[in-house]
Image (cartoon, rainbow, N blue to C red):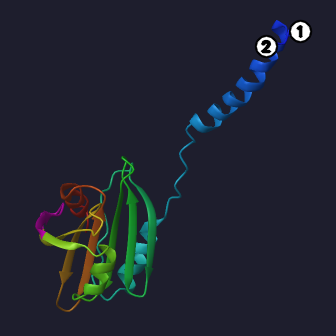
Amino acid sequence: MRNQRATGRDMIISLAVILLPAMAIYYFFSRTPAEPEVPVADWKPVVADARTEAPYDILAPSNLPETWKPVRARYGNDELQLGFLSPEKVYFEVKQRVGANQPGFVSTVTREGVEDGTSEVATASGVKRTWKRYLTGDERSHCLVRAVEGKRPSTTIVCGDVPYEGVEAFASTLA
């Protein structure tokens, strides 16, 4: 049954009661939040300290463009950890630890990764280094692992959420 006393005004009020909450819900759930600001880490003093204290040769990026953001820098217990965000917002990390035979360290950093061949990477100075390739257990990241034996043994791992070519390009900046 239709209400005989209903007017056009009643219809407008009914529409407002339905549409205003619907528009508010649409507004709050459809807007894109602003991208959070990533804190920048001051990595050069950490690397300088590590180079004076570490019982192995420290590798750190050199000549990275200003568009790369350092977001992690730690040194302690003979382990160096560096993290950088590329201009494309891809995270790259470098981890180094004393000792050439570090299967537990490699397994942890590569997230139970499996060996996937080798890469020859030339540095800016032309020195070629051989790295073992690892595909992480979740198959999302690619890692390069280099073990150095001798007087100053160490294990260096470089990982990124990009194909091996991108990780190799980043590893070529290490000096």
Is 172 rendered above or below residue 73? above
Numbered tag placed on residue 132 in the rendering:
none
How packed mark 2 is, by other alpha carbons closer than 10 Å (few <14, some 14-19, many 20 or more), is few
Residue type at tag 2 = Met
| Residue lying furthest right | 5
- The residue lying at 26 percent from left, 66 percent from top is 174
Is 107 rendered above or below residue 39? below
Q: Specify whether 42 is left or right of 85.
A: right
How packed mark 1 is, by other alpha carbons closer than 10 Å (few <14, some 14-19, many 20 or more), is few
Is 167 rendered above or below residue 105? above
Residue 120 forms part of the magenta stretch = yes
Numbered tag placed on residue 11 in the rendering:
2
- Nearer to the camera, 128 or 160: 160
The stretch of residues the image draws in magenta is 117-127
Residue 152 x %, y %: 23, 89
Element marked by disc 2: helix
- The residue lying at 80 percent from left, 12 percent from top is 2
Sequence-wise, which precedes: disc 1 or disc 2? 1
Element marked by disc 1: loop
| Quarter-of-image position of residue 163 | bottom left
- The residue lying at 72 percent from left, 31 percent from top is 21
| Residue lying furthest bottom | 151
Residue 88 x %, y %: 36, 47
Disc number lying in front (1 or 2): 1
Residue type at tag 1 = Arg
Q: Answer yes or no: is residue 132 visible.
A: no
Q: Quadrant of the C terminus?
A: bottom left
